[in-house]
Image (cartoon, grey):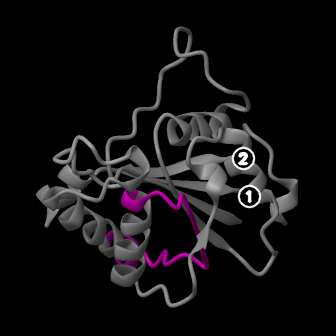
Amino acid sequence: MKTILLLRHAKSDWGSPNLADFDRPLAKRGLDDAPRMGDVLINFDLTPDKILSSPAKRAQQTAELVAKACGYKKSIEWHDSFYGGDSEDLIRAICRLPETVERVMLVGHNPIMEITAATLLLGQEPDFDDYLAIKIPTAGLICLDAPVPEWSALEGGETILRWFLIPRLVKAME
């Protein structure tokens, strides 16, 4: 059984209107929430074997803070296609993982994270008019089980939602 963790970047700072979207850093709340979600991974014994992330500043900071909090010691793999790409880019990145990776975490942006989660669960990109939409707030973390022997066999519709946590709920449980 493989595990896929989908993490939307933490809350970003909108205080500098002249700053390019790609360069927006985390806000104070994001700087607090990212390590909190890393602690969740420690508590569930789900430290990733591999982290793939968007290189945008807010996603990069989120990935690094979560990695530090959960004890991830390897390098983070930056994927340009996670910023402005689509769910197929994220799923292709998962399918290319070596078989030694049992748990992968992807860090990215909406709506691509929501569409990727829905595609992995439903087997197709969702039509948000017809399906129950998956809404992932900032620093929302989804854990999916993928009952496949190897990543290359992963197809949409085969994953099982194990849990979905948001920082507000985690904070309330602390």
Question: Mark 2 belongs to which amino acid?
Answer: Asp
Instruction: Work out whether residue 47 or residue 25 is closer to the camera in this orientation and state it.
Output: 25
Determine the residue located farthest toward the front in the rendered image.
Answer: 18
Residue 109 location (% of width, % of height) = 47, 45
Query: In the picture shown, does residue 14 fall above or below 141?
Result: above
Which residue lies under the disc numbered 1?
93
Q: Can you identify the residue that label 2 sits on?
A: 89
Residue at the spot 67% in from the left edge and 27% down from the top edge: 125
Horizontally, is 93 left or right of 54 in the view? right
- Quarter that holds the C terminus: bottom left
**Mark 1 surroundings within 10 Å by alpha-carbon count, few (fewer than 14), some (14 through 19), many (20 or more):** some
Residue 157 in percent (x, y) is at: 72, 37
Residue 142 higher or lower than 87, as above or below? below
Horizontal side, residue 109 vs residue 124: left or right:
left
Q: Give the residue drawn at x 58%, y 41%.
A: 84
Disc on res. 108: none
Q: Residue at 28% of width from left, 72% of height from top?
A: 35
Pick whichever, 19 or 76, lies toward us.
Answer: 19
Say whether marks 1 and 2 touch (CB < 8 Å).
yes
Give coordinates of residue 88: x percent, y percent: 73, 41
- Say if 51 sits above or below 12 in the image: below
Q: Quadrant of the N terminus?
A: bottom right
* Secondary structure under the numbered disc 1 in the rendered image: helix
Q: Distance between the Cα atoms at labels 1 and 2?
A: 6 Å
Q: Is residue 95 magenta?
A: no
The segment highlighted magenta reads 40-58
Q: Position of residue 68 (x, y in %)?
A: 37, 83
Instruction: Name which residue lies at 27% across and 43% down.
Output: 18
SS for dot 2? helix
Note whether 130 is above or below 169 in the view shown.
Answer: above
Kindly identify the amino acid type of the residue bearing the numbered disc 1. Ala
Q: Is residue 42 magenta?
A: yes
